[in-house]
Image (spheres, rainbow, N blue to C red):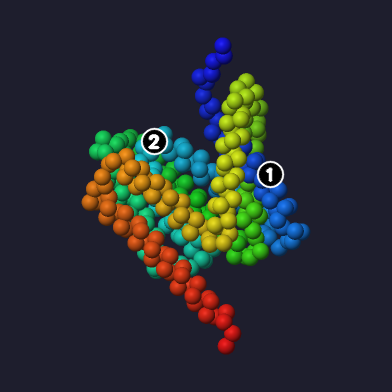
Amino acid sequence: MGFRSTKRFEHLAFLNLAQNVVCLVWSFIMIKIWSNGKSGGAPWWSYWSAGITNTIGPAMGIEALKYISYPAQVLAKSSKMIPVMFMGTLVYGIRYTIPEYVCSLLVAGGVSLFALSKTSSKTISKLAHPNAPLGYGLCFLNLTFDGFTNATQDSISARYPKTSAWDIMFGMNLWGTIYNMMFMFGWSTASGYEAVQFCKQHPEAAWDILLYCLCGAVGQNFIFLTISRFGSLTNTTITTTRKFVSIVVSSVLSGNPLSEKQWTSVGMVFSGLSYQIYLKWRKLQRMTKKRKPL
């Protein structure tokens, strides 16, 4: 009678590499199927800088968890829309309107307020960990790098209007593969060799990794489709809202009534989202009127 191994797979960077490779192959196939020989998208080399920040940023987020609690990181990440707008303006001169800033602040503030009111005093006390400044510093760098990544993707889409979602997916994962390959296999004692050996000894782990990567590839399709058509700020708003809605629904279904402060935060988030939808609709109406012949 066989038994299941109790060994843990500890090479998280290898998961990033594996997902990069699978998503790279997936996007290449999609480009070949749907491009019909058309060109005009952004060249592959234009993603090199976004590839660096997209590779290092998430790693810093994982490292930050060693020094601050998960609720603290959720609080920090709830304001991700602000770095996206700040880096877009600072690096690429992308202009956002005051109403767009108001929408982002409402959503970020609402999620933060909800998370704080849901967190116990015992958990909040953990935020005063001796290494908390290092954890928050890593979290800040993670947000800054994410902001640069998203701003660069927006800039590329603006410079090359014919760039498809799969072009972005291919470029980002190509550079992610290159950088992660260098990190995982760049020297004889690199951890990539240990990860491969682990998968050889535990084939069931390799299948789990493959399933994880395939799910990631499907998810990336929708992420880059949103970025290519609506921009990174919209994508960030969607991902932030998704997490928030799942928390609210989970609280309601589990029979935990929301407090007055939590209902206030729900109102803030959906006010921000409703206002943003209205702004998008109004912009679309103006564009439609301009296209009508006189």
* Labelled disc at residue 67: 2
Q: Position of residue 43 (x, y in %)?
A: 69, 57
Going by the picture, which residue comes out furthest to the bottom?
294
Residue neighbourhood size for the residue with mark 1, other residues' Cα within 10 Å, grouped as few (<14), some (14–19), many (≥20): some
Quadrant where the N terminus is found in the figure: top right
Q: Taking 274 as reference, is 184 left or right? A: right
Identity of the residue drawn at 64% across and 53% down: 166
Q: Which residue is mark 1?
A: 25
Q: Residue at x 39, y 61 (%)?
A: 273
Q: Nearer the viewer, residue 245 or 220?
A: 245
Res 64 visible: yes
Type of amino acid under label 1: Val
> Can you tell which mark lies on residue 156?
none
> Closer to the camera, 205 or 17?
205
The residue at the far right in this view is 37
Residue at coordinates 72% horizontally, 53% vertically from top-left? 33
Residue 194: image location, x then y, percent: 61, 25
Quick one: which residue is furthest to the top in this view?
1
Work out which quarter of the rendered image holds the C terminus and state it. bottom right
152 lies above or below 207? below
Q: CA distance from mark 1 to mark 2?
A: 36 Å
Secondary structure at badge 2 equals: loop
The residue at the point 54 percent across, 27 percent down is 9
